[in-house]
Image (cartoon, rainbow, N blue to C red):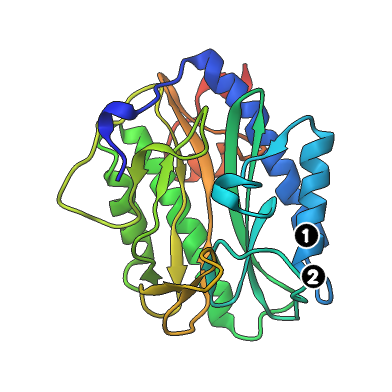
Amino acid sequence: MFHRERIEWKTPEQVRRMRTAGLLTAAALERVRAELRPGITTAHLDAVAAEVIRDGGGRASFLGYHGYPATLCVSVNEVVVHGIPGERVIAEGDVVSVDCGAVVDGWHGDSAFTAVVGSPLDQADAELIELTRQAMWGGIAALDARGRLNDVGAAVEDAVDGRLGIVDGYTGHGIGTEMHQAPEVLNYRVRERGPKVKPGLVVAVEPMCTRGGEDTDVLGDDWTVVTRDGTRAAHWEHTVAVLEDGLWVLTAPDGGAEELARRGARLSGLASA
């Protein structure tokens, strides 16, 4: 559990520096998405992301983190998060979640997306992915109300509306000079209100949802998290800064402008400065 007193509040200039890491993370994920097709291995996706991050002057946040052996987490079907890239061959209809982090000049970006490879074999997979994406954006938009941090989890739960399982035990987090910092960002409603949302807060909002239950298990590699009931899962994530005049989604190429506008949330002027 993170502690409130450890929150690293950022200045606008520090947020600008985090944007560089955020854009590099986004570029790596964009290239990976373009490569995502039947017949390629998860290791190939990892190599693609590593090249983008290296050529962009950054380094991978995940590689070596507590011994993690890769640049990406690539989680397929029933794997929720922390899937280690390897020789697994991706097939038509697979649900693939890709999580990436990059650090530039000491500042981190962290983002994830989920996609169906080719055409969905079951329309419920497409609905799982889109509803989880909408839940992430609902949680992000809730930050603009400047209430309490646990309003994010309430917004995620409201967006899911009982149609999916929200994975228990895995949360979003603060981010900055370290990839994982205080505060913890929950993906569901709780009675405790959490710290006040105010300018300088930078967090990763990342709901993880399943077509079934909320329970998970960790495989023998001590990383790979799978749904206990074997149902498919989705994971979406963005790094978000709270500023005086609104939000800046640091890992979204447009700064979050389109999705924030759809929800009546403000885009910070810093995003276009």
- Looking at the image, the residue that sits furthest to the left is 191
- Kindly indicate whether the residue at mark 2 contacts the one at mark 1 (C-beta within 8 angstroms): yes
Specify the quadrant of the image occupied by residue 39: bottom right
- Relative to 194, residue 166 above or below: below
Tell me the SS state at disc 1: helix
Q: Quick one: 105 or 243, which is closer to the camera?
A: 105
- Relative to 85, residue 59 above or below: above
Number of numbered discs: 2
Residue 214, percent from left and from top: 36, 73
- Gap in Å between the C-alphas at discs 1 and 2? 7 Å
Specify the quadrant of the image occupied by residue 190: bottom left
Tell me the SS state at disc 2: loop
Identify which residue is drawn at 34% across, 65% down.
168
The residue wearing badge 1 is: 45
Q: Which mark is residue 41?
A: 2
Q: Quick one: 217 or 35, which is closer to the camera?
A: 217
Q: Is residue 147 left or right of residue 258?
A: left
- Relative to 205, residue 82 above or below: below
Mark 2: amino acid: Thr
Mark 1: amino acid: Leu
Q: Quick one: 78 or 143, which is closer to the camera?
A: 78
Specify the quadrant of the image occupied by residue 162: bottom left
Residue 208 in sight here: yes
